[in-house]
Amino acid sequence: MAEKKVSLPAKLINGGVAGLVGVTCVFPIDLAKTRLQNQQGVQVYKGMLDCLAKTVRSEGYFGCYRGAAVNLTLVTPEKAIKLAANDVFRQKLSKDGHLPLWGGGTGRARPTPPRRPSATGITVELLRTRGLAGLYRGAGATLMRDVPFSMIYFPLFANLNALGRETAGSQGDLQAQAPFWQSFLAGCTAGSVAAVAVTPLDVIKTRLQTLQKGEGEDTYRGIIDCTGRIMRREGPSAFLKGATCRALVIAPLFGIAQGVYFLGVGEMMLDLLG
């Protein structure tokens, strides 16, 4: 069976649903990742499980979802655009069903205070003290992380998803659709590999975006300054803080995304609305 054509609105819905479901499932691990990456000097948390346990004890179960609303608001459209754009560009750049390698990929609080400001309060404070530019703090580091991530993830997923598939019909036809388990595992594997590969960039982004610094913690002037200070004060291993958490977050997130695409959730929703 040849791969079916999916409309752009359906692709956007698939990406949005994938982001919504995925982030809801893995947000506690993402919270632990951010808190581990923010640690300087005194180590409040020994690891992911210790961080989650202490969070539940001090803030309750829903403390593990602190900031989830902001993340869902941003990640849902981001995943919709990213996954849909990848599909569109893959179709435009592929020739005879094959895609060249060069075309293969196109705010959280600190753990110590018992009471944490709301997302709205942080936004208002940033606008008051730093203006609109304050909301884009760390944007350069975010791009520096997300672009290489996509360059690794999408080609790797495409190749893993194509393993073992038989071509349908004559040479030059599109390949048969991979089974669900293969798409899910390909998404998980490619996501975890790409996530770990760009973890050093994620650490830099997290440090730059941290608003409240503890006693003895560094304040950074930019990406280069942040990189140098981390290397001098904490050593190379600091750039891999939260790597396991990040892999555990991204793997199911993109596995779910590919599963949503496979099941055709967007197409079903459009059919119901039509």
Image (spheres, rainbow, N blue to C red):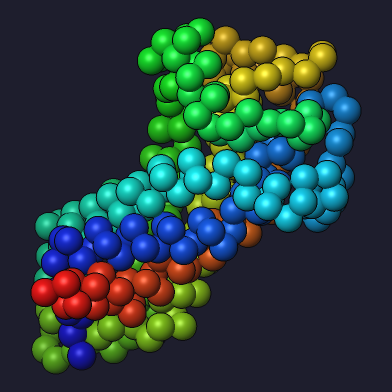
Q: Name which residue lies at 77% across and 45% down.
A: 59
Question: Which quadrant does the N terminus fall into?
Answer: bottom left
Q: Name which residue lies at 51% across and 56% down.
A: 23
The image shows residue 181 at horizontal and vertical percentages of 46, 83
Q: Where 167 sits versus 258, above or below?
A: below
Q: Please identify the quarter of the rendering in which residue 204 is found.
A: top right
Please name whichever residue, 25 or 98, is drawn nearer the observer in this view of the structure: 25
158 displayed left or right of 72: left
112 displayed left or right of 167: right
Using the rendered image of the protein, determine whether residue 154 is visible from the camera's viewpoint.
yes
The image shows residue 118 at horizontal and vertical percentages of 58, 32
Q: How many marks?
A: 0
Please name whichever residue, 88 or 58, is drawn nearer the observer in this view of the structure: 58
68 displayed left or right of 165: right
The image shows residue 107 at horizontal and vertical percentages of 56, 33
The image shows residue 228 at horizontal and vertical percentages of 65, 17
Q: Name which residue lies at 37% across and 72% down.
A: 260
Q: Where 222 sits versus 121, above or below?
A: above
Q: Please identify the quarter of the rendering in which residue 264 is found.
A: bottom left
Q: Name which residue lies at 48% across and 19% down.
A: 124
Using the rendered image of the protein, determine whether residue 104 is visible from the camera's viewpoint.
no
Question: Which quadrant does the C terminus fall into?
Answer: bottom left
